[in-house]
Image (cartoon, grey):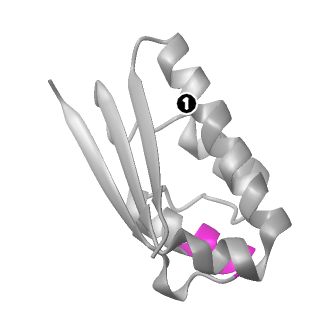
Amino acid sequence: MNQKVFHLNGKKINNKQTFLKKVAEAIEFPAYFGNNWDAFDECITDLTWCPAQRYVILYDHADIFAQAEPTQYQIALDILNSAQEYWEGNNISFKFLTIKK
């Protein structure tokens, strides 16, 4: 099975802008990525630049962002949950694991 695994190192993610920057780097979003929640939602449900039958995102030290900006962190989780529903509705596995240390 064609699988893509992305690692999001959250050690330096303590706000929305840093999260968006780091997730764009980790998943190699296209240059047109707009660095906002709408753009994140659009790119995470596109992924045509890295086609696969399974996507896995490992996000460690998620607690840093969660504690620093809980509302923004929850928005990120909501978008990831919606993306999971979208991909699984298209018979493509999409998993994300948040690891708090």
The stretch in magenta equals: 15-21
Residue 11 highlighted magenta (yes or no): no
Residue extending farthest to the bottom is 12
Vertical comparison of 25 with 30: above or below: below
For the point 79% across and 76% down, the residue is 69
Residue type indicated by callout 1: Gln
Query: What residue is pinned by disc 1?
Result: 84
Q: Picture quarter containing residue 35?
A: bottom right
Crowding around mark 1 (Cα neighbors within 10 Å: few <14, some 14 to 19, many 20+) is many
For the point 52% across and 88% down, the residue is 12
Q: Where does the image place residue 40, in percent across and percent down from the top left? A: 65, 52
For the point 54% across and 12% down, the residue is 89
Vertical comparison of 34 with 85: above or below: below
Quick one: 3 or 36, which is closer to the camera?
3
Left or right for 3, reference 90: left
Vertical comparison of 75 with 79: above or below: below
